[in-house]
Image: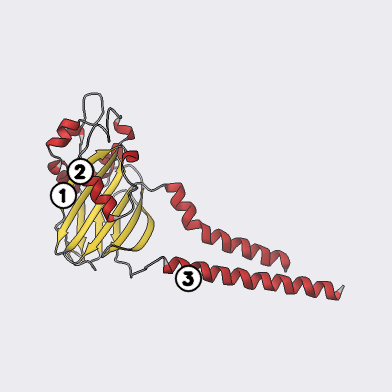
């Protein structure tokens, strides 16, 4: 009996740690931030620059020098068309209808030169701050991060957004998804999308101050406490019987 209860406690702790462990194993990239507001919905993507072509099927060689580093001059001339080519390779719908997402910007930066890609403000900075010698220097493409922003005006913030990725023969892709509504984080998840698969971005209900996580932790703690009490009673019963 004691051994069974100990195993139960261990299982509860493992279940509580699984989401954190998986997020740490996958890292924070590639990442999609969904920014839902009253005037429309924005999508922000961040992923290693070498994976752009494999994920979106679009060529970004026009933004690189002959040695494979980012071409700052070309980036400063404008990246709107490249960003449009990237999103054109995707099929995006809102509540089952084609969603009119338009490119705002595409930038290449060294990730250490920018804030963490965690909030809509971080995302706006990532796609708004012009690439400079401070953020790319002569860094190889393999070390650069690509940041892309897209906006669909008047798309209801409650829309269920589905993104159909092209089949590229590269296997599944793991995304971290951060969903915001009116600047409040409403959901965080790690999703594996099959090659040529669909990523479904459903609006989450408001979760302010991490209440959902707190409720989960309280529930797990209560279960662990009950298991500990049962162990204590069992041990006391054994002592009395002996």
Q: Secondary structure at mark 1?
A: strand
User: Residue 109 in the image: x percent, y percent?
Assistant: 27, 38
Along the line of sight, the residue nearer the viewer: 192 or 114: 114
Q: Residues within 10 Å of mark 3 (few under 14, many from 20)?
A: few
In the orientation shown, which residue stands out farthest toward the front?
A: 134
Residue 151: image quadrant is bottom left
Q: Secondary structure at mark 3?
A: helix
User: Residue 205 in the image: x percent, y percent?
Assistant: 33, 70
Q: Residues within 10 Å of mark 2 (few under 14, many from 20)?
A: many
User: Residue 22 in the image: x percent, y percent?
Assistant: 46, 52
User: CB atoms at circles 2 and 1 under 8 Å apart?
Assistant: yes
| Residue position marked by numbered label 2 in the rendering | 106
Among the two numbered marks 3 and 1 on one chain, the one whose residue lies closer to the N terminus: 1
Rounded to the nearest whole Å, what is the CA distance between mark 2 and mark 1? 8 Å
Residue 199: image quadrant is bottom left
Task: Please give the name of the residue rendered at 84% of the width and 75% of the height, measured from the top-left corner.
Answer: 240
Along the line of sight, the residue nearer the viewer: 101 or 128: 128
Mark in the foreground, 3 or 1: 3
Residue 210 left/right relative to 160: right
User: Residue 220 in the image: x percent, y percent?
Assistant: 55, 68
| Residue position marked by numbered label 3 in the rendering | 215
Q: Is residue 184 above or below residue 56?
A: below
Label ID, residue 194: none
Q: Quadrant location of the C terminus?
A: bottom right
Task: Please give the name of the residue rendered at 85% of the width and 75% of the height, measured from the top-left corner.
Answer: 241
| Residue position marked by numbered label 1 in the rendering | 103
Q: Quadrant location of the N terminus?
A: bottom right
Task: Please give the name of the residue rendered at 65% of the width and 70% of the height, measured from the top-left corner.
Answer: 227
């Amino acid at each position: 009996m004691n051994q069974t209860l100990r195993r139960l406690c261990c299982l509860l702790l493992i279940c509580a740690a699984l989401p954190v462990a998986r997020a740490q194993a996958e890292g924070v990239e590639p990442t999609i931030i969904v920014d839902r507001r009253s005037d429309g919905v924005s999508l922000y993507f961040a992923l290693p620059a070498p994976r752009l072509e494999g994920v979106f099927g679009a060529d970004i060689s026009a933004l690189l020098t002959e040695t494979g580093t980012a071409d700052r001059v070309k980036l400063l001339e404008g990246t709107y068309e490249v960003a449009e080519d990237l999103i054109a390779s995707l099929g995006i719908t809102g509540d089952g209808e084609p969603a009119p997402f338009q490119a705002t910007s595409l930038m290449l930066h060294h990730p250490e030169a920018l804030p963490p890609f965690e909030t809509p403000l971080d995302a706006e900075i990532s796609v708004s701050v012009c690439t400079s010698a401070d953020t790319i220097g002569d860094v190889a493409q393999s070390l650069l991060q690509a940041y892309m922003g897209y906006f669909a005006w008047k798309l209801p913030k409650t829309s269920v957004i589905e993104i159909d990725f092209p089949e590229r023969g590269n296997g599944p892709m793991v995304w971290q998804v951060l969903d915001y509504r009116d600047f409040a984080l409403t959901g965080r998840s790690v999703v594996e999308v099959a090659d040529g698969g669909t990523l479904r971005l459903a609006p989450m209900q408001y979760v302010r101050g991490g209440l959902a996580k707190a409720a989960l932790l309280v529930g797990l703690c209560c279960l662990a406490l009950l298991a500990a009490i049962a162990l204590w009673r069992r041990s006391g019963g054994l002592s009395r019987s002996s």
